[in-house]
Image: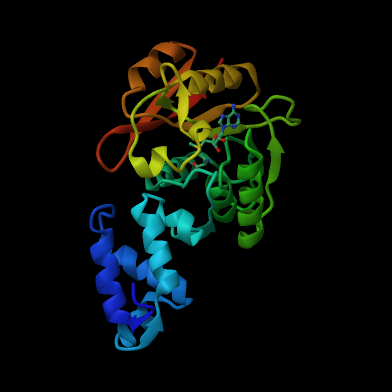
Amino acid sequence: MRRSMRIDEALRLGAKELGAVAQRPILEAQILLAYALGVDRVYLHSHADQQIEALGYFDLIKRRKAFEPIEYITNRVSFYGEEFFIESGVLIPRPETELLIDQLKMELRGDERVAEIGVGSGVISIMLKKLLGDLRITATDISQKALDVAAKNARLHGVHIDLVKADLLEGVDGVFDVIVSNPPYIQNGFPLDKNVALYEPAQALYGGEEGDEILRRIIDLFFACEASVLACEMGFDQRRRIEEYVGDRGSLRFYKDLAGLDRGFVLKKERR
Ligand SMILES: C[S@@+](CC[C@H](N)C(=O)[O-])C[C@H]1O[C@@H](n2cnc3c(N)ncnc32)[C@H](O)[C@@H]1O
């Protein structure tokens, strides 16, 4: 590979290389070149004939060709219109999880005590705190790396969340009005795309032999505590099992994702 070339040439060659792995190779080549040069994508268009040193950029293209997610390469991810830090070892937030925020916006007054289980990069708790500033949020994870990334994102966004290393809410002090979680819910052994299987943490993805084991533990915990609302993301095929598991213990409302698939639920305790 030549060291020096024009920006438009680097983009063309990079996009060609990414054709086999990326759904939008031109866009990804632009993102990687902009990142390598420390400029924004508009700069690439307005300086198409500028001569650059391209070796660093082609190293990034090589990583992407090995299926590494672009978010881990650039350490950036967008969620709910905001930018967050992300790094290998922590789940990349998914667009469908934005729907969980919409559900909570409908349910919350804005001054509740909230517990999030499985905070990951922190996007759910941080967005809730940004949108509803008087919430008091405690968020847990079993992964120290996730807690570190969530702490960094909370700092970047200037919000306060209590972060605790815990299995679900075990040993966590406090009484909560609302519990929220996007837990691991994929069935063990389910084949995933290479970019996910090779790079994202298994403990953030797999939920057990059936997939919904952690969801069930969270439902049990909800019924054993003071909280009156539980909102969770789930797998598109888990609705029937969740309905059966909850039975007549509470009222369930499911919500769908943009593809029309069941994607989560809001569970409330029946009034006595
Ligand atoms: C699907 S990820 C969700 C991350 C983030 N909330 C999001 O929506 O992008 C699930 C998270 O739950 C954490 N986790 C898995 N088992 C857990 C447990 N028993 N207790 C607490 N957290 C757990 C994982 O480490 C991971 O960060």
With 173 as the anchor, is 191 left or right in this view?
left
Residue at image position (46%, 58%) is 73
With 132 as the anchor, is 72 left or right in this view?
left
Residue at image position (34%, 87%) is 47
Q: Quadrant of residue 61?
A: bottom left
Q: In the rendered image of this protein, does residue 65 appear above or below residue 11?
A: above
Residue 241: percent from the left, percent from the top? 38, 15
Residue that lies at the very extreme toward the front in this rendered image: 1
Residue at image position (73%, 30%) is 172
Q: In the rendered image of this protein, does residue 233 appear above or below residue 66?
A: above
Figure label count: 0
In this view of the protein, which residue sits in the foreground, 28 or 261? 28
Residue 95: percent from the left, percent from the top? 38, 48
Q: Which image quadrant: the C terminus?
A: top right
Residue 136: percent from the left, percent from the top? 67, 44
Residue at image position (41%, 17%) is 210
Ligand 1 is found in the corner quadrant, namely top right
Please name the colour scheme applied to the rendered image: rainbow
Residue 248 visible in the current orientation: yes
Q: In the rendered image of this protein, does residue 190 appear above or below residue 224?
A: below
Q: Which image quadrant: the N terminus?
A: bottom left
In this view of the protein, which residue sits in the foreground, 9 or 83? 9
Residue 106: percent from the left, percent from the top? 46, 42
In this view of the protein, which residue sits in the foreground, 234 or 50? 50
Residue 78 visible in the current orientation: no
